Image: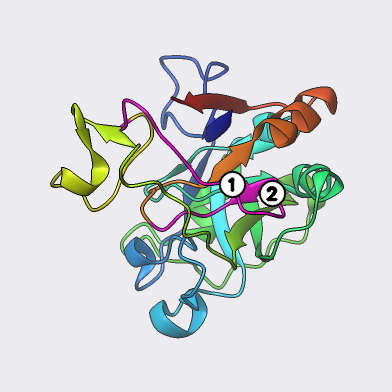
């Protein structure tokens, strides 16, 4: 079984605003800098900062391992989760450091007019969380079976689709490489990273929190 991963937001109360655990402090080019494609250097091409900065709920961040972000959905994982994935098997990746600042000081770190980062430096560890990273895979697997993957009743090859989102396919067929899949991998036609059954089990066994696994049919 192959899984897509979404952040579990069940802990967020309906009246809470925003309905995300972390909101990006925006930078020029942020809308295109998702750190998703393996062959793109987002720092060089889109001017992404070396450290991605967010404002969020630090009480939630303290016990979560996967955090939902806005306005761009980054794969923001705890460093602990990365170590768990590494324990399953090797995979090529880049980690982009991230810092989440407490919402209490949002007015100090984010300019109200531009939405950009201010000069204000936060050194108090109680007002920031540096335990998360954005995961960017650096390898792709050309393994989608375009004839056996079914979309809207048709083989993917005959459909008008170029890409598939989570749950878009009625049946998803991937050709397993001889060496097997790494715990998390990128398929060019899929708009999400794929996680193996072994990766899910390792994360479940480690007691990781905030992970909503979506089996892909």
In the picture of the structure, the residue carrying the numbered disc 2 is 180
Crowd band around label 1 with a 10 angstrom C-alpha radius: few (<14), some (14–19), many (20+): few
Determine whether the residue tagged by mark 2 lies in a helix, strand or loop: loop
Circle count: 2
Find the distance from the CA under tag 2 to the CA under tag 1. Answer: 6 Å
Above or below residue 216? Residue 33 is: below
Q: Is residue 8 visible?
A: no
- In the image, taking residue 125 as reference, residue 170 lies left or right, namely left
Segment tinted magenta in the rendering? 168-188
Q: Position of residue 173 (x, y in %)?
A: 44, 37
Q: Residue at x 50, y 68 (%)?
A: 118
Residue 211 painted magenta = no
Q: Residue at x 54, y 34 (%)?
A: 5
Q: Main secondary structure of the magenta part?
A: loop
Quarter of the figure that contains the C terminus:
top left
Q: Position of residue 131 (x, y in %)?
A: 76, 50
Residue 176: which numbered mark, if any? 1
Above or below residue 212? Residue 114 is: below
The answer to whether marks 2 and 1 mark residues whose Cβ atoms lie closer than 8 Å is yes
> Relative to the observer, which residue lies in front, 63 or 56?
63
Quarter of the figure that contains the N terminus:
top right
Determine whether the residue tagged by mark 1 lies in a helix, strand or loop: loop
Q: Position of residue 168 (x, y in %)?
A: 30, 32
- In the image, taking residue 130 as reference, residue 191 lies left or right, namely left
> Relative to the observer, which residue lies in front, 179 or 163?
179
Residue 58: which numbered mark, if any? none
Q: Position of residue 72 (x, y in %)?
A: 39, 51
> Relative to the observer, which residue lies in front, 122 or 217?
217
Crowd band around label 2 with a 10 angstrom C-alpha radius: few (<14), some (14–19), many (20+): few
Residue 186 painted magenta = yes
> Relative to the observer, which residue lies in front, 55 or 200?
200
């Amino acid at each position: 079984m192959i899984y897509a991963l979404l952040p579990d937001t069940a802990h967020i109360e309906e009246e809470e605003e925003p309905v995300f655990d972390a909101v990006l402090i925006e930078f020029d080019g942020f809308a295109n800098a998702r750190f998703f494609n393996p062959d793109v250097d987002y720092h060089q091409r889109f001017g992404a900062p070396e450290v991605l900065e967010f404002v969020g709920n630090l009480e939630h961040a303290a016990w979560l391992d996967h955090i939902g972000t806005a306005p761009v959905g980054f794969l923001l994982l705890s460093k602990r989760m990365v170590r768990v994935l590494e324990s399953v098997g090797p995979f090529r990746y880049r980690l982009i450091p991230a810092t989440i600042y407490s919402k209490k000081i949002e007015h100090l770190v984010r300019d109200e007019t531009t939405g950009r980062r201010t000069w204000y430096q936060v050194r108090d560890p109680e007002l920031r969380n540096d335990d998360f990273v954005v995961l960017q895979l650096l390898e792709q697997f050309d393994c989608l079976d375009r004839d056996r993957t079914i979309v809207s009743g048709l083989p993917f090859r005959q459909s008008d689709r170029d890409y598939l989102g989570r749950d878009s396919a009625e049946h998803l067929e991937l050709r397993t490489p001889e060496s097997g899949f790494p715990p998390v991998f990128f398929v060019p036609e899929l708009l999400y990273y794929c996680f193996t059954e072994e990766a899910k089990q390792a994360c479940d066994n480690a007691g990781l929190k905030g992970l909503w696994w979506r089996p892909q049919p």
